[in-house]
Image (tube, rainbow, N blue to C red):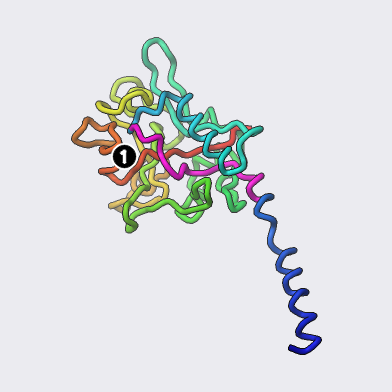
């Protein structure tokens, strides 16, 4: 190797290091991810508190937990004298970035618009990995939300939240498609947060039921601060 070549190698390495932001800096800015795994008990998440704790625990393990407060993107329906809770009202103001530093939405309005940046490539887990979608085995793109397309709760009556995230048997939970893809070319199939209710032989809310339609009990997690 010539002297000029030997000098060029470290120079190139230095330029590459300057061009790429440190992984730690990107991690520190993370404010959105899809959980790499579910709680494992179907639609029984232990209520909103249990779901939030799951987000916080995974974020902490990935290196971007506290002081951030992590919230699961979930709605609850009015029941037993308690008012409904809208997913859109509990996740902060944005903007939100994935593990790689990509902005997925600037604010709540952008998140619930056609212009958001939620795609299979950007809806990454806390580990920076894509979630299996249509065409992958097993498909895991059904993400629990219990929400309408605008991020609000469904009216009381027909269950869309597995009994406000306490049932692993009877009921149903509205899910969204993390890859924005379904079996049909319609708005519901392309919706990240309101594609179809869960269903299955166990009643609609068991872990097996969630898996049977292409899910795994995964959640969207947002840093609320």
Classify 136 as above or below 12. Answer: above
The residue drawn where x is 43% and y is 28% is: 75
Residue closest to the eye, 54 or 88: 54
Image quadrant assignment for residue 192:
top left
Magenta stretch: dominant secondary structure: loop
Residue drawn at x 52%, y 49% is: 127
Q: Is 171 or 2 nearer to us in this picture?
A: 2
Q: Position of residue 57 (x, y in %)?
A: 53, 34
Say which residue appears at 49% left-offset and 53% top-offset: 129
Q: Is residue 47 left or right of residue 159?
A: right
x, y percentage for residue 203? 22, 30
The number of numbered discs placed on residues in the rendered structure image is 1
Q: Which quarter of the picture shows residue 76? A: top left
Badge 1: few (under 14), some or many (20 or more) residues near its Cα, within 10 Å? some
Residue 52 percent location from the top left of the image: 50, 29
SS category of the residue bearing label 1: strand
Residue furthest bottom as drawn: 2
Residue nearest the observer in this picture, 124 or 86: 124
Location of the N terminus (image quadrant): bottom right
Q: Is residue 3 left or right of residue 13?
A: right
Give the residue at the far left of this rendering: 201
Residue 203 horizontal side relative to residue 97, left or right: left
Q: Residue placed at 40% from the left, 28% from the top?
A: 45
Residue 70 belongs to the span the image colors magenta: no
Q: Does the magenta stretch include residue 34?
A: yes
The residue that label 1 is drawn on is 196
- Judged from this view, the residue extending furthest toward the top is 81
The image quadrant where one finds the C terminus is top right
What stretch of residues is rendered in magenta? 26-41
């Amino acid at each position: 190797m010539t002297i000029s070549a030997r000098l060029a190698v470290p120079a190139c390495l230095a330029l590459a290091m300057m061009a790429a932001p440190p992984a730690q800096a990107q991690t520190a800015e993370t404010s959105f991810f899809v959980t790499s795994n579910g709680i494992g008990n179907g639609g029984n998440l232990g209520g909103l508190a249990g779901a939030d704790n799951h987000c916080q625990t995974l974020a902490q393990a990935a290196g971007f937990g506290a002081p951030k407060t992590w919230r699961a993107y979930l709605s609850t329906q009015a029941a037993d004298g308690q008012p409904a809770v809208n997913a859109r009202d509990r996740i902060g103001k944005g903007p939100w970035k994935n593990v790689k530093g990509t902005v997925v939405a600037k604010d709540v309005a952008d998140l619930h618009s056609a212009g958001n940046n939620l795609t299979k490539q950007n809806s990454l887990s806390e580990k920076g990995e894509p979630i299996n979608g249509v065409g992958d085995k097993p498909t895991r793109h059904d993400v629990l939300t219990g929400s309408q397309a605008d991020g609000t709760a469904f009216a009381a009556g027909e269950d869309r939240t597995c009994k406000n995230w306490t049932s692993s048997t009877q009921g149903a939970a509205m899910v969204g498609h993390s890859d924005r893809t379904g079996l049909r070319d319609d708005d519901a199939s392309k919706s990240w947060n309101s594609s179809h209710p869960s269903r299955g032989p166990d009643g609609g809310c068991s872990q097996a039921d969630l898996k049977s339609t292409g899910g795994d009990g995964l959640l969207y997690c947002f840093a609320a601060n």
